Image (spheres, helix red, strand yellow):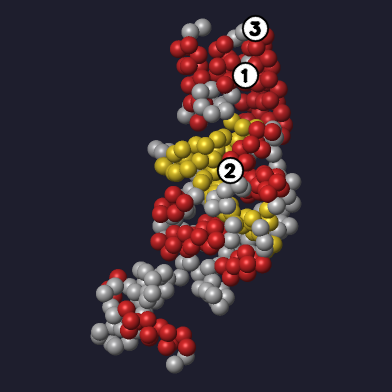
Amino acid sequence: MSSDDRWVSAELREALARGDLPALAEAGLLEQQDLEYLLSFKRSVEDAEDTDRYQELLMQAVSKKINKAVEYGNLSVMSHANGISQDRVDASTVTFRDKMEELWKPQDRDHMLNLVIYAPPPPTGPTGVGKTDTAYTLIEGGELVHSEYGGLTAASNNTTDPFDDVQSWTELEDWLEATDGTKVFLWDEAAQVLQFDDINAGRALSRLIKLLRKYECHLILIGHTGKDIPKDVRRMVLFCLKESKYKAEIGAGLEEDQAGWMQIKNVLFRLGNIKETAIDYESIGDKGHFTFDDEEGDSGSSVNKKPECWALSKRSGNVCGNDAITPEDDPVLCVNHRRADVEEARERRENSESGS
């Protein structure tokens, strides 16, 4: 068998794994009778590929095929099984521990992991592929890595897990200040707050990442399809695409393909055989809550509520009140008052806040 033939076989494996062909990803690693049985199983059982029984049958069938290929020196099957891209790391092996070391990098105090977990659009996702379960699995990996560096303390906005509960910016700040050492904050169902086309959401997430870095805190954020993460923040985070309950890939950058999937541009590594987390929790579905309140804890002030312009209207002489486009500047101004007298606007705001 020529090297070109082996390359074609490996390329076919990659195409099947990506879903480019209307066939089982493992089609080239199955005997005819096993292939027919698994297809029949898929037709008769809902979400068959996510069942333990299907995975057990698949493992037996593929193992049998590879065993025979090794015994008889079938290079075509072995090349097909190996593929041409980075090997998928089995999340139950020691190699997974090495990848977690790369991901969390506890030896670099300036590095904090900011990871967004998302899923493909329907019908594959965005629900039902185990995003939250993988988040907890990665936290377990982080705890294992950080155990050699003083430990890792976790908090989340999911009130059902054993971690400290954090439901707002103020609560997060309090937790960060009261907690020593390296930390991780898990923000579940973040898409309920962050809208990918909302510039305020991008600014809020950017502020959050800066706050966490200040206190040596990692961030794991669970979104939907990747599009819910503002474009101007995507360069600040890594992404984890949950391809299925058992598979994921982690890397940097996003790009939309012809099918509407947000694909990872630069894949660092791929995970397979992702086991169910040992951390006890319940899914919060679409009830994820996190409020970007102000320093006084005003829970009515959220990321989606735009601040009002503090400049005076020339017509009425009153404070403008239109949506501001510079919510983090001092003072905040709308598009029509960007050239307003800064000191005058700042003085009006300070007088208002002091009650004078």
Looking at numbered disc 1 in the image, what kind of residue is underneath it? Leu
Rendered view: 353 above or below 294: below
- The image position of residue 280, as x and y in percent, is 74, 51
Give residue 199's mark. none
Looking at numbered disc 2 in the image, what kind of residue is underneath it? Leu
Rendered view: 114 above or below 100: below
- The image position of residue 148, as x and y in percent, is 70, 46
Rendered view: 101 above or below 167: above
Tell which circle, 3 or 2, labels the residue nearer the N-terminal end.
Answer: 3
- The image position of residue 13, as x and y in percent, is 52, 23
How many other residues sit within 10 Å of disc 2, few (<14), some (14-19) or many (≥20)?
Answer: many
Say how many tags the image has.
Answer: 3
How many other residues sit within 10 Å of disc 3, few (<14), some (14-19) or many (≥20)?
Answer: few
What is the spatial separation of the Cα atoms under label 3 and label 1, in whole angstroms?
A: 16 Å
Is residue 71 rendered to the left or right of residue 87? right
Give residue 30's mark. 1
Is residue 227 rendered to the left or right of residue 119? left
What is the spatial separation of the Cα atoms under label 3 and label 2, in whole angstroms?
A: 39 Å
Tell which circle, 2 or 1, labels the residue nearer the N-terminal end.
Answer: 1
Q: Which residue lies furthest to the bottom in this view?
A: 356
Q: Quadrant of the C terminus?
A: bottom left
Residue at 25% x, 85% y is 315
Rendered view: 355 above or below 271: below
What residue is pinned by disc 2? 103
What residue is pinned by disc 3? 72
Looking at numbered disc 3 in the image, what kind of residue is underneath it? Tyr
Q: Is residue 144 visible?
A: yes
